[in-house]
Image: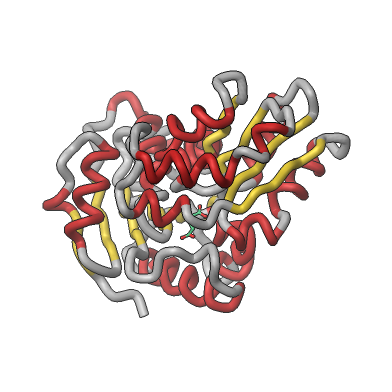
Amino acid sequence: MCKDNVMDNRPIGIFDTGLGGLTMVKALCGLLPGEDIIYLGDTGRVPYGSRSKETIIKYAGQNAAFLHGLDIKALVVACNTVCSVAFDEVKKPYSIPFYEVVKTPAKVAAQSTKNNKIGVIGTKATINSRAYELAIHSCSPEISVFSVPCPLFVPLVEEGWTDPDDEAAKLIVKRYLEGLAKENIDTLILGCTHYPLLTETIKKVMGESVRLVDSAAETAGFIASDLKEKALLKGDADSQPKGSVQYYVTDCTKSFAAHASNFLKSDISNLVKKITVE
Ligand code: DGL
């Protein structure tokens, strides 16, 4: 039981455009195994990264409204694209805590670089917004930031072509990152929650010495401690029975369920439901 008897049994909502936000589900389940989680993957409209700000606000707003309607206690926007261009607009109508995934990885990278050279990869919308650059420079203005949009990485992940030996993935990753690999960066922010699924392929191009910063994994620690501080956890994380995770998607469930089960190393096919958010 929490201090002062305060506890909140409602689930935590998380959304992204497809499989990417599962990096947040995995990280939060690891840190807060007793919490119930509801995940929404907007598979019907992925990717968001090449869409306009207006469309991203509209889609993300509909996702937030759907999850809010399920009586969640907090919402994690596990999408760098939405967080970079539309976070304030999406959050505005609600009073529950909303969490974004840009500021924490930017801070971690700024603290981690030794040579003051950081790379950022993300969707076109994320890179064009310069949200990472601004967040890094607010920590340390002298850092040089090398930003590269990688629009084909999200479709690669959604297609399940993430095996480090996949020839198509190797070719695409090399084509986007070979210029960046020559810039002598020592830290690379994976500024899209889909990209950690390509970690091994990215490492092959960037080299083992470059530290990869995973936006979801880095932010999960902050979310866990903030929920605890706000007395919003179900109770003491160590004494809770295992929480549940429900998955909603906005289009066919089969491919999402197969790739998600592969990534989570657990068969979730019976837990995935198709819904409409419009
Ligand atoms: N995972 C989303 C992100 O972090 C992908 C956005 C997209 O669908 O393009 O940016």
Left or right? Give the position of 52 relative to 4: right
* Front position in the image: 108 or 209: 209
Q: Quadrant of the N terminus?
A: top left
Figure label count:
0
Residue at point 20%, 52% (across, down): 257
Residue 250 x, y percent position in the rendering: 29, 69
The vertical placement of 55 against 206, above or below, is below
- Residue at the (12%, 52%) spot, across then down: 270
Where residue 81 sits, quadrant-wise, is bottom right
Quadrant of residue 126 within the rendered picture:
bottom right
Q: Which residue: 59% across, 74% down? A: 52
Q: Residue at x 44, y 66 (%)?
A: 64
Counting from the top left corner in percent of width and height, residue 214 is at 52, 36
Would residue 3 be visible to someone looking at this image?
no
Please provide percent x and percent y for residue 200: 43, 30
Q: Nearer the viewer, residue 37 or 197?
A: 197
Q: How is the image coloured?
A: secondary structure
In the foreground, 6 or 41: 41
Quadrant location, the C terminus: bottom left
Is 115 on the left-hand or right-hand side of 27?
right
Instruction: Give x and y (percent) for residue 61.
Output: 49, 72
Q: Is residue 262 visible?
A: yes
- Residue furthest out toward the left: 270
Which of the 4 image quarters holds residue 51?
A: bottom right
